[in-house]
Amino acid sequence: MNFLSTQFWVLLISVLILTRLIRPVIHQKLILLAASCLFYAFWDWRFLGLLAVVTVVDYYVSVGMQGAHNEKTRKTLLAVSIASSLAILGFFKYFNFFTATFDSAASVLGVHLPELGILLPVGISFYTFESISYVMDVYHRKTEPAQSLLDYSVFIAFFPRLVAGPIMRAANFLPQLQHGIRLEPTGIIRGAQLFGQGLLKKIVVADTLALIVDQVYGSPWLYSSATVWLGVCSFAVQIYFDFSGYSDMALGIARILGFELPVNFNLPFTSQSFAEFWQRWHISLSTWLRDYLYFPLGGNQKGAWRTYFNLIVTMLLGGLWHGASWNFVLWGGLHGLALGLERAFTQDRPSKEWRISTSWFKALGIFLWVALTCVFFRSPSMEMAGQVFSKLAFIDPGGVVWFFYPAALYLLIVFIGGLLMRLKKIDLATMDYYQPYFFPVLAAEYLFIFLFATRNNSPFLYFQF
């Protein structure tokens, strides 16, 4: 079940009707949990048990840590929780990857490990990270344990963000849960605008760009270097609009139900530095990596070389989080290297004023770096990535010339439009109904969807992670 399916709208409307008829907060929580389980079961009902195990273990670990007076006991409980979450994530997502890597290294010795037909549970990377952050925050006394197993279950399974985030912190969500579902006109209008914004990004922009991206990455050797360049740049924009579109729809649905989720993207292609890019791209993941990996490693408090090491390790693991492939590891490592080099050789802070001409060129440079590193993100193998780069380097420039006009138009609109939004200080992420351009934007969103939506929608890209 996804946001574009008929089943989802039947589910959402049923939740809205039931919560209007049933007002006690505890009953509304039960409705939310039942709806979330049903939503997840449409993917594969067998993995509901896995979700339940993660939820129950970490809830009782948090309760145990809160009541324990012995620091050793608290540390033991923390270790049990993190180890169990990482073991589940490692087995389902990385077992075959590590066995394949071991086999390739040990094949000369005739040693082989079995490859199991393991299915990847949808959303496992997201809800395990939420669970880990929760128990760590309880351990460090940054947040109180959930008031009940029901509250914590709703937090982990909340269906608008269950399968692809944004990654939520318990301290931000659990207090909101105490008032139950609040259906208010302002929330419904704002939610409709956010959902329309996300839907426009997904089925108009991302799915249109998928037409050239899938063809170019499917057979890069068939196309000219210029066409491959267009396809590579198109994928960087496609994945942004695909994932930020999902995030906006999740925020919109949650807002309709009376909940606020964190903004996950904020014009990342207007960034003037690599550090700023990661403050604007997949914000919930980058802040998670900062708070629960980079800072515990020492952050920038242990000297310059240790800082560079921490940055690279954090981004390497961030790349591995995205998928069980060396392509993702290399992608993360390249971003870690860029962050380290930027920190080593630049002292100036990016300008916040877009009247400075150099800001435009910095943003273009960041975009090109992101697009080029995304070759590893999109390519199914290193061999395919090598073929794409040979085209990009004009080593083999021949092939079919396909100037896909919609892609060129969207690239132009995205880059110039984003920079103009920064220049005019227009922030759609914080737009509310009382602002003068709210209703024109809302009407324009749904008009563009009606006029330009693609007929064949591709799956959300981040569902695979």
Image: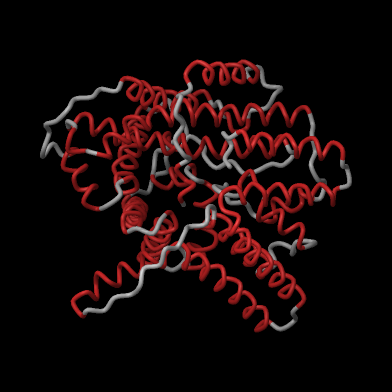
Residue 93: x and y, percent? 45, 62
Q: Nearer the viewer, residue 1 or 260?
A: 1
**Residue under the image location 81 percent in, 50 percent down:** 178
**Quadrant in the picture for residue 445:** top right
Q: Is residue 222 above or below residue 343?
A: above
Q: Nearer the viewer, residue 51 or 432?
A: 51
**Quadrant in the picture for residue 443:** top right
Residue 128: x and y, percent? 57, 61
Question: Split into 4 quadrants, where in the image is the N terminus?
Answer: top right
Q: Is residue 111 above or below residue 86?
A: below
Residue 463: x and y, percent? 49, 47
**Residue under the image location 66 percent in, 68 percent down:** 58
**Residue under the image location 56 percent in, 59 percent down:** 129
Q: Is residue 424 above or below residue 75?
A: above
Q: Is residue 36 left or right of residue 424?
A: right
Q: Is residue 155 above or below residue 149?
A: above
**Residue under the image location 18 percent in, 32 percent down:** 225
